[in-house]
Amino acid sequence: MALVDLSSKRQWREVKWDPPPEPMTKNIAFQKTAAQSSNYSEGGIPHCAAYAVDGNTDTDVSHRRCSYTNNAAASWQVLLDDHRMFNISRIRIYLRKDFWENNNGLQVLVNGDLCVPVSGTTPDWLHGPVTNPVDVTCTHVMKGNNVTITISGQFLTLCEVQVFVCSDGWFGSDCNKQCQCLDPSEVCDKETGYCRSGCAAGKHGPGCQQDCDHGHYGVSCSYTCGQCSGSSDCQKVNGTCTQGCQQGYSPPLCKVCNDRWFGTNCSKQCKCQNEIEVCDKTTGSCTSGCRAGKTGVGCQDDCVQGQYGINCSSTCGQCSRSSDCNKDDGHCTQGCQIGYLLPLCKDCVEGRYGVNCSQQCGSCKGDSPCNTTTGVCMLGCTDNFEEPYCKSCVQGKYSVNCSATCGHCKDGPGCDRSTGHCERGCLPGYAPPLCVKECGDYTYGLNCSGVCSCLNQCEVCDKVTGECGTGHQNTTTTTPTGTASPVKADDTGNATDVRFIVVCCLMVLLLAYSAVVTTLNVRLRRLQALSKAELEKQYMSLETPEESSAYDVISIQGVTNDV
């Protein structure tokens, strides 16, 4: 509300001020010992100095809750403590609500030293309205245990005086800095924030107000952060990586490898045979041994070329194009060499057997497979094939499917089982090499090597013995037994006899040809005669020009026909 002082005609205003709780500061003047230069009395009742520290901020003097002096060079003082010194910089004064001019020349002293107020924090008694209460803030913190207020006049009226210092746990000129002591029960220096126990974890510097530098944490910032995710920093008190760890590290500190990771920067993954085993986080060693396909220190190396499996003890199969197999299970991912069976390419495909599966099964019965190692047809052979491999024909048979029968071979029924040739020649009367066909005409004997020598040179002799029905050309000779036998031409005369026989046959053929030609000529002439008679008959019935006779026409026609 606004009031007017009738004696001075100056306007002033009173603000009812009940500050909210301020945990950072406390009033150390409350109910402390106070004294003043004199006591003003009304009706025999004095306005004591203690009324200014009783906690009542009523500014109406008539309610007798304000201190009041009554002599020149008036002063008022409060003793804050007998021994302890305080850091003092803020004083709040509640003045009486009237007679404002009595406050001219008001000063505040701390242990006798003048508190030089910051500009704008003391009442301008001569110019303009003043807010009540009056906050006085010293330009610097003053150390002391008593506060004195003086005026140049005789009537000093103080309804309440509050001296603020930092609450325990706070410090600084504005008490806006919180203590950061390692011992949480310690009260730091309320001016500097110094802690006898040292700074709390995560803090350092003057007054322990600075956070640890990037990458450090803990008491005295003496610990190094772990491998936090990305470039994030750890929590400054306990080192926790709040955004997680880099790959391979274990939260919350991210300093040790996560389970199943090891090595520098935890960058290597365990490769143990027992998948749930946690390997040594330094070396990667596994008590269960390395998993399939891995070997070496820390089980980080693949099996060498051509090996796979546990301890790399298995050998790869016949993979295609010399490619390596899968190191875990031995599978040939690019296929097998010809004749081998996926996925390992170690067994022969159906129909092949032997080293490198290079041999093809024979003609097993019913197209059944043979043994992939020995090649034996377990169910027997197709007809006419010889057991146990069923690759060759039985004796007396030949050709691809052994369906052909050998000819009349000498010294038994056996022939070459592929070609059918009689390797020792044919029986007498059969022609090599198959010995199936009889000897040609005019030949006889073993392999048809003999030539007939019959008296009738066109006679075909017996193809086994060479005997002739008409007898032989040579005279008979008497055998040791006295019987007559034909004397066969010797080998030196065989060629001459054959040539003679061929000439005879050619002469016969020539005579036959001449007879055929003569017969055809006779028939042709007959046909021409018949044709001419028929034409004459036709032209006789035709009208001819007077100058031409039918004979002429026929003659002309005949000439034409001859042409």
Image (cartoon, rainbow, N blue to C red):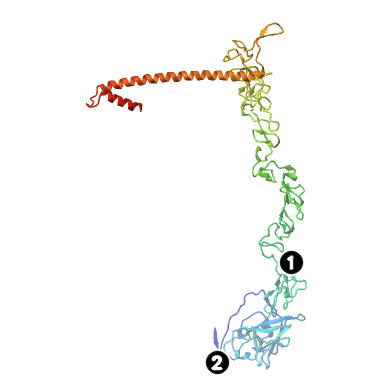
Front residue of 4/519: it is: 519
Front residue of 515/16: it is: 515
Residue found at x 50% / y 18%:
511
Residue pointed to by mark 2: 9
Q: Quadrant of residue 248?
A: bottom right
Measuring from the top left, give residue 402's x and y in whole percent: 62, 25
Element assignment for label 2: loop
Q: Quadrant of residue 331?
A: top right
Measuring from the top left, give residue 43's x and y in whole percent: 64, 88
Amino acid type assigned to the residue bearing label 2 in the image: Lys
Is residue 563 left or right of 3 when viewed as pictured? left
Residue pointed to by mark 1: 218
- Which residue lies most toward the left here? 546
Front residue of 378/136: it is: 378
Amino acid type assigned to the residue bearing label 1 in the image: Gly
Q: Quadrant of residue 61?
A: bottom right
Is residue 280 left or right of 382 when viewed as pictured? right
Q: Is residue 10 visible?
A: yes
